[in-house]
Amino acid sequence: MAGTQFFGERIKRNEDPRLLTGQALFTDDVNLPDMLHAAFYRSPYAHGRIQSIDTSMAQEMEGVVAVYTADDLGDYWQPGPLLVPPPPVKDIVFNERTQVPLAKDKVRFVGEPIAMVVAESRYIAEDATDLIFADIEPLDAVVDLAAALEPDSALVHEDVGNNISAHVVQQKGSYEAAKAKADHIIQREFEYDHGIAAAMENRGVVAQWDRRAQRLTMWDTTQAPVFVRNGMAALLGLSENQVRVIAPFIGGGFGPKIMMFYQEEVLVPWAAMKLDRPVKWIEDRSENFVATTHERNQTHTVEAAFSKDGRLLGVHDVFLHDQGAYAPYGLTVPLNSQCTLLGPYDIENYYSEFTAVFTTKTIVTPYRGAGRQHGVFVVERLLDIAARELGIDKAEIRRRNFIPPEKFPYNNEIIFQDFAPLKYDSGNYEPALDKALQMIGYDDFYQNIQPQARAEGRLLGLGLVAYVEGTGIGPYEGARVQVTSSGRVSVATGIGTQGQGHFTSFAQIVADQVGVDVTDVDLVTGDTDQFHWGAGTFASRGAVVAGSAINEAARDVRQKILKLASDLLEVAEDDLELGDGKVQVKGVPDRAIPLGDLAQQANPMRGAVKPGTEPGLEATNYFGPEYGATASGIHAMIVEVDPDTMDVQILRYVVVHDCGEVINPLILDGQIQGGVAQGIGNAFYEQIIYNEQGQLLTGSFMDYLLPTSLDVPNVEIDHETTPSPLNPLGIKGAGEAGAIPTGPLFAQAVEDALNHQIEIREIPLSPSKLWELMQ
Ligand code: MCN
């Protein structure tokens, strides 16, 4: 790249003044003249047959404009698209069942929308939902994963004939051969239960149909605006250019906001067109608990073969994965679990089989980490158990199993979520481990701190885990970069942004290429009228894929600047340099053209230009990686367990992280700190609990406990850098890193504090669960 004045610097975020002073636009800020408001009548049952729906009283209520049930939708009623098709794995079983806009014959989870009310105000719309009566014959709920596969289980989708959403086997080497050679076999069952993303901003959509222009505009809290635009156009019978989707500022996405299509997302624009008035729907928190997709809940039955010196020779894992009632997102989550179990370890033999199960619960789609947590939990627990049973230090057993640096690129052979073989592009794990050991004071802890604490009756424990994260997957992103005649640089890319600092990190890349200040770069993300190609923000791919596309486009603009300036200044391009918002002859400040002036000259009103000349200092370019870049990290933590209450206090938390070259270490630290906070919540505080009837028992923040700033320590962060060879900037993704290994870290540290009186095989933990285990 050009220079690195900004790349790699801790630069404060360009977007923060707007956010901190309340100037940023969120979906709920969109208020249009004549706007109507929607509210949804949702299923009170997990599973039931709809006999009839009476909306007459709601229809008659003053201020109600329309009430719709499935029957009112006509041909518009159709199951949503399958976002991710099944992977090309041999003998795969895959039963496609995707969500419907409004339940028609059956309800399949508590919170499934049955009717939509559109009214003059949200108050009226909400009140009207109380006047809707659905006669539903309750059916047995399908809650437990193993019971769902029994022949006598109720069926979520009768036409499938069982509750199997998918069955996948992937393997490398031969586990049986590894077992035959092994000195030590471990068998265990592990469980990782449900959680939610709990973003600060709930979902929302505002839609406006402009009859005169024949255009639909949607403001949507989506992580994938281009997909929503394309999908809505297809559903509504419009051309893609007739639909504009704007994903404005979003108060946290964390995965569930990629889901396409949420039922409300499909219905609100349809109603806006039908009623010829703008319609708004903003999800409330109770709805968010049941209607926004969840993640997790897997049970693993695993066997591992070790040599006596602690080498992990092979793993045999069979697991059940809860899909919820429908599976619009395909198998991304269980595939990630299957792949990420292999971690940074040189495991030659692996058998992994999963059954994804339909249950009568909220739909499961990726949530920060997207199933990687589960795999990491299993392999890290296995290493902990093996270390203890074989008498090997827990850091040492990890070191012995790391993939050595000379083995990269390292091909794990099985298929990853992007359907490419799970290949690690680069990595070097031992230096990161050494750094983490040093930062947490590993030796001192075991020689002095823990024994002293024990002598005082205090229970201190240390956790140390490693993981990899496949990031930066394709297919592609694109960007347009333009130097405007004001001298400011406009950048547009198709991905949406939910707090990742894109406005700054992407500006840093552009500023270096075209020689302007980072604050002179204006970024637009997630507005399909500004840039209409792209996939979206997920899988920690924004920096790698959109960042690289922006780099390519900015490099093209740089070349245009040099070419035009070389003509105008009559010097060779090599004799020019860019900086301070101008292009100048090297070492001759007098012979310079401000970029704004050059942009004007690149768009002449008069005079001849050579045929084929492109006007403007503007370029569009795309980037698609060959396969994903593999980030990695070590997390270490010291906890204190209260012997009376079993509450856990985190005394220190250390992360050594490798995401290749870092664009902005300040933002990256924030990403890791935030991820760790979510990881801590998932490991110790948050749990989605259903009763046997499939009713959600933890449907409010009174019952679903989020960690607060008092529970989350200041994370001490350092980096190792193994640049990715798969993109010119050498970057790997980072957005999910903090959240991935926290479960096994908690388990290990707490076991250590309790002097191994218990073995932890489930996540999330809580004081009461620890107390039960101790009994
Ligand atoms: N970064 C960097 N150098 C790198 C990699 C990343 O400086 N080598 C910084 C960049 O500023 C980049 C940010 O980290 O903008 C995140 O980069 P990346 O890993 O590419 O992640 P994405 O941009 O694709 O964001 C998605 C990712 C995911 S998958 C979830 S889930 C998540 C996350 O980001 N959701 C978030 N972080 C979040 N942060 C906030 N505030 N809100 C969310 O909803």
Image (cartoon, rainbow, N blue to C red):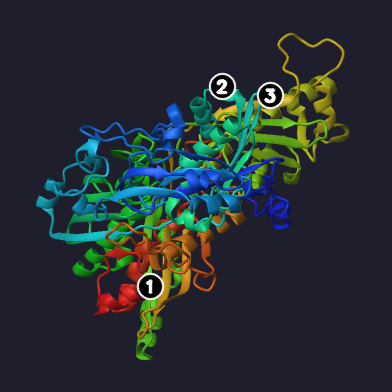
Nearer to us in this view, 358 or 305: 358
450 displayed left or right of 611: left
Asked whether disc 2 touches disc 3, contact meaning CB atoms under 8 Å apart, the reply is: no
Nearer to us in this view, 1 or 14: 14
Q: In terms of secondary structure, where does tag 2 sit?
A: loop
Nearer to us in this view, 606 or 767: 767
Relative to residue 366, is residue 717 depicted above or below? below
User: Which residue matches tag 1?
Assistant: 462
Q: In terms of secondary structure, where does tag 1 sit?
A: strand
Residue 239: assigned label = 2
18 displayed left or right of 345: right
Say whether mark 2 is within 8 Å of ligand 1: no
Which of the two labelled residues, at mark 2 and mark 1, occupies the earlier sequence position?
2
Say whether mark 1 is within 8 Å of ligand 1: no
Look at discs 1 and 3 and give the one toward the viewer. 3
Residue type at mark 2?
Ser
Real-space Cα distance between discs 2 and 3? 13 Å
Relative to residue 708, is residue 629 depicted above or below? above
Residue type at mark 3?
Ala
Identify which residue is drawn at 48% across, 66% down: 701
Q: Residue furthest bottom?
A: 456
Relative to residue 663, is residue 600 depicted above or below? above
At which x and y percent is residue 99? Answer: 38, 39
User: Which residue matches tag 3?
Assistant: 213
